[in-house]
Image (spheres, grey):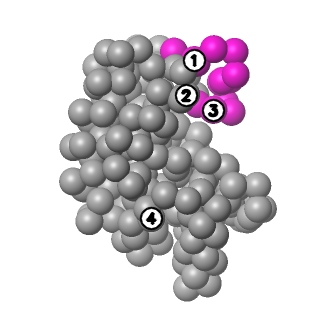
Amino acid sequence: MTGKALIFSAPSGSGKTTIVKHLLANNPDLGFSISASTRDKRGRTESHGKDYYFLTPEQFKNKIDEDAFIEWEEVYEGNFYGTLKSEIERIWSEGKNVIFDVDVKGGLNLKRYFGDRGLGIFVKVPSIEVLKTRLNDRGTESEESLSRRLFKANFEMSFADQFDVVLVNQDLQRSLKEAQELYDRFKGN
C-alpha cells in the first residue's frame, strides 16, 4: 500500500513543527513520520517512539548497515538523524498519508525519493533577525548553539528554490491556513 508524502523542511526555529502539529491535529488522514536520532532528549518533554526514535550512535550505524533508512545524515557533529523505511510502511499500512518535519537536506532527499508522490514545502522565516529572536525565545540554545544554528540557517535558505513550495511564515494563522490549502490540493491530485 502506498500513499503520499508531505515534506516540511526549514531552518530550525522557522515554525515548521508548529505547522506540522496543526495539520496533524486537523487531518486524521495524516500520519507523522518519527525520525531516528542519536541526539539527547530535550528535558522531560520528549519520549522515545513519540518525538524521535532515540538511538545510540552504534544502533544508528547498525541500521545504516542494514539499509533501514530512506535517508540519513549527520546534521550536527555527532548527531545523526534519519527516516526509517519501517516508519513509512507503518503509516501507509494504516491508510494514511505521511507528513515529515525534517531539516533541509533530509527534505530534499525525501523529495527525490518520493518524486511526484511527495510535496516538498520549505518554511521560510521573514529574516535571520526574526529567526534569532524565535530561537532565543525557546530558551533551549546556548550562545554557541545559537550561533551554529544561525550560520546553518543562512546556508539552508539557499536551498529554498529546490522545494515545490516556499511558505513564508510571517503570520502564523495565515501560514496554518496556507499549509492546509496546500495539503488539500496535494491529496486531491
Say which label, 2 or 3, has the lower sequence index.
3
**Label placed on residue 41:** 1
Q: Label 4: which residue?
A: 167
Q: How many marks?
A: 4
- Residue 30 place in picture, x, y as percent: 68, 60
Give percent across and percent down for residue 144.
31, 15
Circle 3: residue type: Asp
Of labels 1 and 3, earlier in sequence is: 1
State the SS at label 2: helix
* Residue at horizontal 47 percent and vertical 27 percent from the top: 136
- Say which residue appears at 49% left-offset and 57% top-offset: 169
Specify the segment rendered in magenta: 40-52
Q: Which secondary structure type mostly characterizes the magenta part of the structure? A: loop
In the shown orientation, is residue 49 left or right of residue 153?
A: right
Assess whether mark 3 and mark 1 are in contact (beta carbons under 8 angstroms): yes
Q: Secondary structure at mark 1?
A: loop
Task: Inspect the image, locate mark 1, and give the three-letter code of the amino acid beneath it.
Answer: Lys
Q: Is residue 139 magenta?
A: no
Q: Is residue 172 left or right of residue 36?
A: right
Residue named by callout 3: 51
Answer above or below: position of 176 versus 140.
Answer: below
